[in-house]
Image (spheres, grey):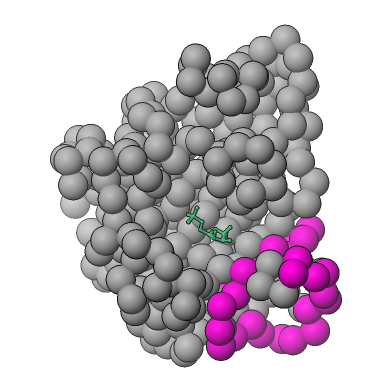
Amino acid sequence: MTPSIEKIDFHGIEAFRLNGPNGASAIISTLGGQVLSWKTQDGRERLYLSEQAVFDGSMPVRGGVPVCFPQFGKEGELPRHGFLRTRRWALNTERCGSDFALLTLAVSDDDASRAVWPHPFQAELTLMIEADRIDIELSITNTGSAPFEFTGALHSYLRLVQVEDAALEGFYGHDYRDAVRGNEIKRDTGTELVVEGEMDRAYFNVRRPQYLKAGNYSLGIQSQGFPDVVVWNPWVERCAELKDMPADGWRQMLCVEAAIVREPVQLPAGEEWYGRQTLVIV
Ligand code: TA6
């Protein structure tokens, strides 16, 4: 099937479905510029989307790949993870080739954003799918006349059969901040990371790809431009506190996020920054 792109209604929001080669597909919503689905050529859904996600814009959609900007988490005065997750983005470009489909959504500052963060900017989210690979790129342009700094993430929710059977390699020797243990800084000394309880770790200055072994499939995870990687699973108690997550939702997900946490990006006036996360079935 020749790759194509179609506008769809996804839970009442305007979205686009990218139909890639050999039956691969992805869905991205104009609400939040958020990838909400990625299916590989075997038809299997690779991203977690909560059955209780809210799509009316009153809160971020729980799952897929939320775009966190200009602030990661609660690392500042803004709402957690910034304010782009509930903004309406607009189609910027789309194109298909024989073996890929690509689409870009864009959003920029307005009175509401400048009221909480006084900087002109343009954000673009580019999604590209091939047979068993997805590339998600965030670009930020400083369209103002003064420099600004930001943190953020592509907050990817990976779908798992059950998180207890998963193992994540690639962090050996890296320092991380453990938000579950009072933001203590530790050094990772294990060959693989397994989730056996609530996990909320920001690994700093990660230069290697990660390798997720998840029961009966393996995923390569690579980022460019994003210096840090955040690994999050709410486990039972935290999950129960999230009204947009089913009680057992924690079991089918693991967030592996391309992130800027420790060192904000400094962006001079007129300059562009970009960062990318690539997920590929291996
Ligand atoms: O990336 C991990 C994290 O910062 C966790 O601390 C948790 O808050 C998670 O993001 C989800 O945040 P959200 O605002 O989407 O509920």
- Please state which of residues 244 and 252 is positioned toward the viewer in this rendering: 244
Res 250 seen here: yes
Picture coordinates of residue 168, whole percent (x, y): 59, 79
Which residue, as the protein is rendered here, is positioned at the far top? 145
Image-quadrant location for residue 45: bottom left
Picture coordinates of residue 263, whole percent (x, y): 80, 46
Magenta run includes residue 18: no
Side of 117 where 24 appears, left or right = left
223 lies above or below 274: below
- The range drawn in magenta is 182-211
102 lies above or below 123: below
- Total marks shown come to 0
- Please state which of residues 116 and 18 is positioned toward the viewer in this rendering: 116
Side of 215 where 266 appears, left or right = right
Res 98 seen here: no
Side of 103 where 191 appears, left or right = right
Side of 203 where 231 appears, left or right = left
Residue at horizontal 66 percent and vertical 72 percent from the top: 180
Residue at horizontal 39 percent and vertical 46 percent from the top: 60
Residue at horizontal 48 percent and vertical 72 percent from the top: 238
122 lies above or below 34: above
Picture coordinates of residue 275, whole percent (x, y): 62, 43
52 lies above or below 56: below
Magenta run includes residue 205: yes
Picture coordinates of residue 129, whole percent (x, y): 38, 50
Residue at horizontal 74 percent and vertical 31 percent from the top: 149
